[in-house]
Image: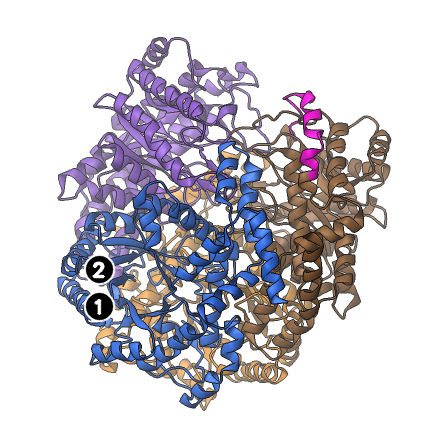
Chain colours: A blue, B orange, C brown, D purple
Amino acid sequence: MSDRAYQLFEEQQKERGIDLAQVKERLKALKVETPSWGYADQGTRFKTFQKVGVPRNTFEKLEDAAQVHKFTGVCPTVAVHIPWDKVSDYSALKAHAESLGIGIGAVNPNLFQDDDYMLGSVTNSNPAIRRKATEHLLECVEIARTVGSKDLSLWFADGTNYPGQADIRKRVVWMYECLKEMYDAMDDDMRMLIEYKFYEPAFYHTDLADWGMAFNMANKLGPKAEVLVDTGHHPMGTNIEHIVAYLLGEKKLGGFHFNSRKYGDDDLIVGSINPYELFLIFYQILDAERDADPGVAANAARIAYMIDQSHNIEEKIPAMIRSVLNVQTQLAKALLINFDELREAQERQDVLAAENAVRSAFECDVTPLLRAVREEMGVPADPMKAYLASGYAEKIAARGKGGASW
Amino acid sequence: MSDRAYQLFEEQQKERGIDLAQVKERLKALKVETPSWGYADQGTRFKTFQKVGVPRNTFEKLEDAAQVHKFTGVCPTVAVHIPWDKVSDYSALKAHAESLGIGIGAVNPNLFQDDDYMLGSVTNSNPAIRRKATEHLLECVEIARTVGSKDLSLWFADGTNYPGQADIRKRVVWMYECLKEMYDAMDDDMRMLIEYKFYEPAFYHTDLADWGMAFNMANKLGPKAEVLVDTGHHPMGTNIEHIVAYLLGEKKLGGFHFNSRKYGDDDLIVGSINPYELFLIFYQILDAERDADPGVAANAARIAYMIDQSHNIEEKIPAMIRSVLNVQTQLAKALLINFDELREAQERQDVLAAENAVRSAFECDVTPLLRAVREEMGVPADPMKAYLASGYAEKIAARGKGGASW
Amino acid sequence: MSDRAYQLFEEQQKERGIDLAQVKERLKALKVETPSWGYADQGTRFKTFQKVGVPRNTFEKLEDAAQVHKFTGVCPTVAVHIPWDKVSDYSALKAHAESLGIGIGAVNPNLFQDDDYMLGSVTNSNPAIRRKATEHLLECVEIARTVGSKDLSLWFADGTNYPGQADIRKRVVWMYECLKEMYDAMDDDMRMLIEYKFYEPAFYHTDLADWGMAFNMANKLGPKAEVLVDTGHHPMGTNIEHIVAYLLGEKKLGGFHFNSRKYGDDDLIVGSINPYELFLIFYQILDAERDADPGVAANAARIAYMIDQSHNIEEKIPAMIRSVLNVQTQLAKALLINFDELREAQERQDVLAAENAVRSAFECDVTPLLRAVREEMGVPADPMKAYLASGYAEKIAARGKGGASW
Amino acid sequence: MSDRAYQLFEEQQKERGIDLAQVKERLKALKVETPSWGYADQGTRFKTFQKVGVPRNTFEKLEDAAQVHKFTGVCPTVAVHIPWDKVSDYSALKAHAESLGIGIGAVNPNLFQDDDYMLGSVTNSNPAIRRKATEHLLECVEIARTVGSKDLSLWFADGTNYPGQADIRKRVVWMYECLKEMYDAMDDDMRMLIEYKFYEPAFYHTDLADWGMAFNMANKLGPKAEVLVDTGHHPMGTNIEHIVAYLLGEKKLGGFHFNSRKYGDDDLIVGSINPYELFLIFYQILDAERDADPGVAANAARIAYMIDQSHNIEEKIPAMIRSVLNVQTQLAKALLINFDELREAQERQDVLAAENAVRSAFECDVTPLLRAVREEMGVPADPMKAYLASGYAEKIAARGKGGASW
């Protein structure tokens, strides 16, 4: 049945004007980085529920991540968080990853889990604490160099809880000074990905509260700095794909932290709450890949796709596989947009036809396509089913409860 | 200067048509319950910063709470949370409180910090877990009886994180069954205060998501059940004072969990982010106290005022004193509304005059009034200053770091 | 190709455990009421753009609505709004509708476009205005009787713009008194559908602000009163399908006003902004249709599905056809949920499997199914294409610009 | 009594370390521009209620605005909107204003009330429409020159209602091209104030959706371009004072459109819904006035304060007076912040003391101060009372109903 399904799908798409060979090539080029902390126990401020089989250290986290890559074929790297993933020998960590067929991806400094950072790290009014924070940033550059990573992914919990608590404008300057020092220490081929967040854990103001503040900081720092969009870090109602398109037009979109939210920064499985939004993000990216301006197209091509989620109640590895599949599914659907048809509708200002050109691609069932692509890539046609049947979950159950938190 | 200030204030209010004797009487009648957990270390999912001097057990929490009462004169009771405040001998706990000049207030069951409750407590599809949850509710009724408390304050973290995860309608029925059993076990003069929350820790749906669901539950249970409004548990933009007025009209407003928020459930010091909102809540309450329907007036008179906050970065006891003072301040301002003038403006449909009757009371400086009231109550005119000068903070510093979490 | 597509679809669904015969039957039972005002010129407070071919009166609105029914087969009735659709002879209106193969649906009183209603209609502090409003409600009951409609659909713009402007609690009582009079005048087989709205045009408080207030009103009035859910009338982040499920559990869900929103009450084409949300609403409805409690199942079966949109920039008739198709599409997808599989996953508390049972149905392409159903119903397989080719748009262009507003 | 009140106020502020002479000087320097359209009939999309006495043309609007200036002393200019205020002879308009003791302020082009602009003005894919829009912008520069205005205030309704409707990135470029042409036509001492808006009337994406997009545009255009903050144009929960502080740090804050909102862009009387927010905005401005960087201080000093509201149900002139008084009141309160004390508390990281330094200024009653300032300025101590007693309302009642809309 699946052969007939693919054949029919191919005919249908041909009729829609879609070249499946190109679609498949683009799908195979997708790389989604998974985060080491996504395999660990996580929770809310109310409770972290401990799961059986959670990795007890970074080496085991990499082993679990390697499973996700094994079954999906699109997750060759793993982001690390320092000090959650602090080890005495980073070369050994790198070698371990390579032995598993994967690599270390973005290095994430942690500037929010030390008593010193209670009132800010790079924006703390105490210069000694800013120094300490800067040293940690520099340490992470060095770690990146050691593990062969090119991306430094920066999220700051810095902000205030009350009006008057701190000098908002000075904190902007202090942050710039710290980041400038880090920026200057980075190799020319490294990237600084600057994340922003609307709120939490700061509850009155966040020093980098929105894309505009992250973008302005990246502009001031220089070409190695770009903006990182975490899909859960916006005010309610925000049109995220608009921000994505805008940053692409400015050639400053560094990457994504994918996850889903219905309310705040819920960190649910990407694509599980509003799949159309994820599709529309990919529509903007694919549109930029076709831009006449080579700088815009180049930006679209170098985006770092990363997952950043908190699986509080789900089984860790299946939750990660589901996340990766959801990303792949929405990219596949977006690839079925007939951009010529869309452009024509836009040009004749036919609102309904233009909307239809986009939505109708979303309504296609891409199962036959993804099965075919996976077969060509040499991975299981149904990665989730294959993983569940693999016995890995039973094997890691021996780790028991009480694995790593974060 | 302060005598002259009060004299002038009295003249001004007389001119505005306000009878200060009544105002003072009402102010003295205010009781604000503080929560035992508000004295403990608290944090976000990202980090709990440990403070020096945090109480190490419930007995020490009561001692700190007694300080707040000593300096403000309006906090004679302390809410407890089981099992955070579980002790082997609740009579001893009661006696300890009484020796400190305070009493035990609302008893709060905890149905969210046990691995069994990961997918729900009273709404769990597993009947054994619902049984366990119900037993805990019954245990709390018994504890309330022992400590002499009349209020049982219920917040449920129950809900789901994903579409399809559970049967929403069945969970409503299950919750009712558990609460009914608790309700029937309660003495006739006990109150069940049912809290609702828009989201968190559940991220797709919360079983009691809004006042309407809590209200409907309370209606089905009977007269001993009422709704508890936590000021931080609403969607953005919600007019909380409208809900307060509505519940008063229905004679079903049980009480408040006071705190402030700018974004989500930030649990900041009440009155620190939007003081006018707190004032407007008191305006609705005072208006209901004057209602021709004695049932409405009686409801307004029996409201339980409780603080529920998470002092992540603040000094605990001063933060609590500040909270209590903010509540007192906004009640004092609301008492300066000339309700006759307001009613007349409303009746002649003069929008601007009616708005002015309310806002102009808010703009009064109630410092002279509060100083006078405090003197008459025999507590310091400036409770914060008096506490800071008392040496208590220095004394409890000996507790060191690492006190109770929650 | 389309025969092979349907055959394959049938095989795939059989494998998924879906009985297509039942699915088709349920799809054929769908009725979606379109609103007369959806064919007229509409706009924002900033501007109403006039379109060519807009109907100049209610008779022409019915003619356009009949086209939507002709091409989709699922829109046999049209909601009317009084006085927008006021005519001297309602029997003639009814006869005109019938001559077009359609009927008059819900009657909507209008209590917001008269200078008298500036500060409220049924909640106005002036009893003469409340009387006027009540008379209009009674007039609408009479009109419903004349045109053979059983549904009275009530939305109130009533509310205030400023704190203190009016007495919130009294307004609740006044509204009840007016509605009670209308309720008593209604025939036993008529339904009062009570709509709520978070805000706009009132900007401080809305008398019926949420489902809880509408539900409580309906409960007090009696069995003929039910709640109407307008999908655009909620605070940001609200889980609408939760409210739908909850109201079904209470047997008080009267109907829907369908539309889409990204921000406020945007009144865009239903299913165009977040199609998954519409699908999840239908999931809850179909789940309730299977409820063991016959009252719940009966409620699910009698829901009134109505469109309420404001096509500011779109072509009117195509926008309405697109809306109807979107509703049909999401119902079709929801019908592909394997409820047995879902129930089993829920019972064994397998979060990811339960979520997958729901989402995987959404990912199916229902085009072959809908084409087949339409063929069996005797309407075009592609209603939009057929309408665009029909020449009707060209014909009504003769109406010119300057048609009815609302 | 009012003399004694001022004397006591002076003593109290002296004790708080506040120099009232400076405070009064700063208060006298405040200028608040009122909008011509704020005197006209306005409404929501549902209804514009017509008021008696509304000005029938721009000359009468200026007369009403002159009354506001007469009674408050702080509103010497009036913003105009073209074509709402289009006249054949702008010199005559200027002369009329001057004869009334006021002047013409910011010129506001209107690019949203012409059928051509339905799908965009400066971002329309049709170059002829962009040309038309640009010509209007150039016309407004010319009008500004004629009436002696230095500020051009730009708000664009441009955006889309549906995914796919238009090319988001191209629209950014098109807007830049149009604004660049206008920018180049402006005199060196003119300012372009670029407003942004989260949504409405566009409902899927707004071309200038947030401060970041307006700021980036202003940066690209050059020093004559700055950002205009409309307090009602943000997502829910946004910390507006943070944006204000940030823009001041970047020396790019051009001005304000003041109004209040509880939900969307409600356009209520400024300071009526959340007065503390307005106070906190002024706190950031006054803080910037004290900045060591002269560029920041200069930016704070040149901010254009403008009111932009929609008085749908209020009496027009009293609503405007109330708005101006609210602005004045919150500035007065912010001037009572002891910035030295605040700085010290911030430097020793005393969160509660810093918060207190800000909030306690807000709690002061500034009535005695404002009365004194007004007396010194030669305007009535109670402007509202004086206006209501003046007989002007009775006089303009002769205009009848049916005045200007907008």
B178 relative to A144 in the view: left or right: right
Q: Disc 1 versus disc 2: distance between alpha carbons?
A: 9 Å
Quadrant into which the N terminus of chain A falls: bottom right
B310 relative to D282 in the view: left or right: right
**Marks 1 and 2, the one that precedes in the sequence:** 1
Number of the label disc, if any, that sits on residue B302: none
- Residue C276 image-quadrant placement: bottom right
The image shows residue C361 at horizontal and vertical percentages of: 62, 63
The image shows residue A403 at horizontal and vertical percentages of: 38, 83
Q: What residue would you read off at disc 2?
A: A190
C390 magenta-colored: yes
Q: What residue would you read off at disc 1?
A: A144
Q: Is residue C359 shown above or below A294?
A: below
Q: In terms of depth relative to the viewer, which is nearer, B225 or C36?
A: C36
Q: Looking at the image, how many numbered discs can be counted on the residues?
A: 2
D83 magenta-colored: no
Q: In terms of depth relative to the viewer, which is nearer, D291 or A100?
A: A100
- Residue A206 image-quadrant placement: bottom left
Using the rendered image of the protein, determine whether residue C335 is visible from the camera's viewpoint. no
Q: Are marks 1 and 2 in contact (CB under 8 Å)?
A: yes
Task: Specify few, some or many for label 2: CA neighbours under 10 Å numbering under 14, 14-19, or 20 or more.
Answer: some
Q: Is residue C7 shown above or below C173?
A: below
The disc numbered 1 marks a residue on which chain?
Answer: A
The image shows residue B401 at horizontal and vertical percentages of: 25, 79
Question: Disc 1 residue type?
Answer: Ala
Q: In terms of depth relative to the viewer, which is nearer, A46 or B98?
A: A46
Residue range corresponding to the magenta coloring: C386-406
Quadrant into which the C terminus of chain A falls: bottom left
Using the rendered image of the protein, determine whether residue B328 is visible from the camera's viewpoint. yes
